[in-house]
Image (cartoon, helix red, strand yellow):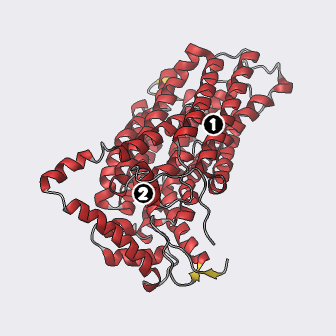
């Protein structure tokens, strides 16, 4: 890459600083973000664990019963996400006073405790308790991780670094699928506990968000942290960017101080009722809804049963590992799709393609006459062996496309669209909507299949995807490559973003 003068815009106009290795600037941000991503990977292992747990418990004696019921299966696939709603709301509240990195560390011991409960569990209520702990710990880190990535990244890197959240999450899912294929579910839980422990230790070695430190009056530490994040350079090298950041933070604080105590009390709630907060929140929540009601979410949770039902021509657990691999590939591709195509094309194209896959999956289920889910492969026959690869390929393609676009998109937007003073709370509420929708989709999936058949459910998913793509065309502005302040000004109706990807000026 060589040496060049690098714009280090921190959500504002470009500020040039003296020459420094661009490679060092990029790697310092990658390292800081990826230490956070260890906890994201741990969260992915949480998301993938029910897929391992459900078939393992199906024939295992828990709570003095042989096997588990469909109702218990649906609770295993969804109960953790009910606690995640509480965790996301608390996440926004603890992120602001404690800081981004410290808030993430607080969640690590909770997740370790959850895995230990799994390891020792011999009653169904203990399984449910561990799942609740998993959901709580996973959601506690949503707001601080998203806010941290948005605040430490340069605009031309922000989209790609934010997209690593979904990439690391599905890597965690793939790891869990692979472990679950070869190991007992208790052993899987024991191995999983190592990841939050590793994250807890390494988080002590990365800098806190400079933006948060300045807002807390710790400018000297913020200056040093910014130098760390811009290539382990000197304080003089980042002086221009630091002053720009301080100026914006001082403006925000002066605006708060200019109000009377009574007015401030009123504004604490009022700022969450303003359009500049509610508009982006509604947009993000809607995209989270689309990401969970397109067939890819329930495919991950009930993968083994779906592959069994669709008569996949290979072991269901190996097919599940392939599913995890396609998720990783899709999220990896999203790093480049978002950079070169932008978020609008990324979201709309993936929804349209996912809709087509859903139509095909539903039609195949209708043709071969499998209206309902099967929970084991006893009595399975393969009369249509020459065509048995069709549903497997369609489901894997659906997962690949969804994880290249719509499953990643809301997580990228979450750190960009909210004003600075409400970002942590907005990230928390937005993340809560993610867990709410994943709970609803997983809990209702079996009910919907029993009421509408597999054909009806997948055709419904197709309709939601197509309608969602049309709404996104009119309602989603292009934020890729844009400065944070420009994005915030768009939702504040101060200015308007165009629908073109902003390329970095060389």
Q: Is residue 409 shown above or below 104?
A: above
Label 1–label 2 contact, CB within 8 A: no
* Residue under the point 42% across and 49% down: 491
Q: Nearer the viewer, residue 259 or 305?
A: 259
* Residue under the point 34% across and 71% down: 247
Sequence order check: which comes first, mark 1 or mark 2?
A: 2
How would you rate the neighbour count of disc 1 (Cα within 10 Å): few for under 14, some for 14-19, many for 20 or more? many
Q: Is residue 439 shown above or below 153?
A: above
Q: Is residue 111 visible?
A: no
Pick out the residue farthest to the right: 386
Q: Nearer the viewer, residue 128 or 341?
A: 341
Q: Is residue 366 shown above or below 11?
A: above
Mark 1 highlights which residue?
351
* Residue under the point 74% across and 22% down: 364
How would you rate the neighbour count of disc 2 (Cα within 10 Å): few for under 14, some for 14-19, many for 20 or more? many
Q: Secondary structure at mark 1?
A: helix
Q: Position of residue 153 (x, y in %)?
A: 50, 65
Mark 2 highlights which residue?
147
Q: CA distance from mark 1 to mark 2?
A: 26 Å
Between marks 1 and 2 in the image, the one whose residue lies nearer the viewer:
1
| Quadrant position of the C terminus in the picture | bottom right
| Quadrant position of the N terminus in the picture | bottom right
- To which quarter of the image does residue 254 belong? bottom left
Q: Secondary structure at mark 2?
A: helix
Count of marks placed on residues: 2
Q: Position of residue 88 (x, y in %)?
A: 37, 45
273 lies left or right of 141: left
């Amino acid at each position: 890459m060589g040496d060049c003068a690098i714009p280090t815009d921190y959500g504002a106009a470009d500020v040039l600083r003296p020459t420094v290795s661009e490679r060092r600037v990029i790697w310092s941000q990658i390292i800081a973000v990826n230490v956070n991503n260890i906890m994201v990977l741990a969260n992915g292992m949480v998301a993938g664990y029910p897929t391992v747990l459900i078939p393992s418990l199906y024939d295992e004696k828990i709570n003095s019963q042989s096997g588990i019921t469909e109702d218990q299966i649906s609770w295993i696939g969804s109960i953790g996400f009910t606690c995640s709603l509480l965790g996301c709301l608390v996440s926004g509240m603890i992120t602001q006073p404690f800081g981004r990195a410290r808030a993430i560390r607080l969640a690590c011991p909770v997740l370790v405790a959850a895995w230990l409960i799994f390891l020792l569990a011999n009653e169904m209520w203990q399984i449910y308790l561990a799942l609740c702990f998993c959901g709580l710990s996973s959601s506690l880190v949503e707001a601080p991780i998203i806010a941290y990535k948005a605040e430490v990244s340069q605009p031309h890197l922000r989209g790609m670094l934010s997209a690593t959240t979904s990439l690391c999450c599905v890597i965690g899912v793939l790891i869990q699928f692979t472990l679950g294929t070869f190991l007992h579910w208790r052993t899987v839980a024991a191995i999983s506990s190592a990841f939050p422990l590793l994250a807890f230790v390494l988080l002590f070695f990365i800098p806190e968000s400079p933006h948060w430190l300045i807002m807390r009056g710790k400018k000297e530490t913020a200056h040093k942290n910014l130098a760390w994040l811009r290539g382990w350079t000197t304080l003089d090298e980042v002086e221009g960017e630091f002053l720009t950041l301080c100026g914006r933070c001082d403006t925000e604080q002066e605006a708060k101080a200019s109000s009377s105590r009574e007015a401030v009390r009123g504004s604490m709630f009022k700022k969450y009722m303003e359009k500049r907060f509610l508009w982006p929140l509604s947009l993000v929540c809607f995209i989270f809804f689309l990401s969970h009601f397109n067939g890819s979410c329930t495919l991950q949770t009930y993968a083994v049963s779906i592959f069994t039902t669709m008569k996949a021509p290979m072991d269901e657990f190996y097919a599940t590992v392939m599913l995890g691999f396609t998720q990783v590939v899709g999220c990896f591709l999203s790093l480049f799709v978002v950079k070169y195509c932008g978020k609008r094309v990324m979201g709309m194209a993936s929804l349209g393609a996912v809709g087509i896959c859903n139509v095909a999956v539903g039609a195949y289920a209708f043709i071969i006459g499998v209206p309902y889910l099967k929970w084991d492969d006893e009595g399975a026959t393969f009369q249509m062996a020459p065509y048995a690869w069709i549903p497997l390929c369609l489901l894997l393609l659906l997962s690949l496309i969804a994880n290249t676009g719509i499953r990643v998109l809301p997580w990228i937007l979450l750190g960009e669209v909210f004003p600075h003073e409400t970002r942590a709370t907005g990230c928390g509420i937005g993340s809560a909507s993610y867990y709410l929708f994943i709970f609803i989709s997983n809990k209702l999936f079996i009910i919907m299949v029993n009421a509408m058949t597999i054909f009806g459910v997948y055709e419904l998913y197709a309709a939601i995807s197509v309608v969602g793509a049309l709404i996104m065309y009119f309602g989603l502005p292009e934020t890729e490559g844009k400065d944070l302040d420009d994005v915030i000004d768009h939702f504040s109706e101060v200015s308007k973003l165009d629908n073109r990807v902003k390329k970095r000026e060389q």
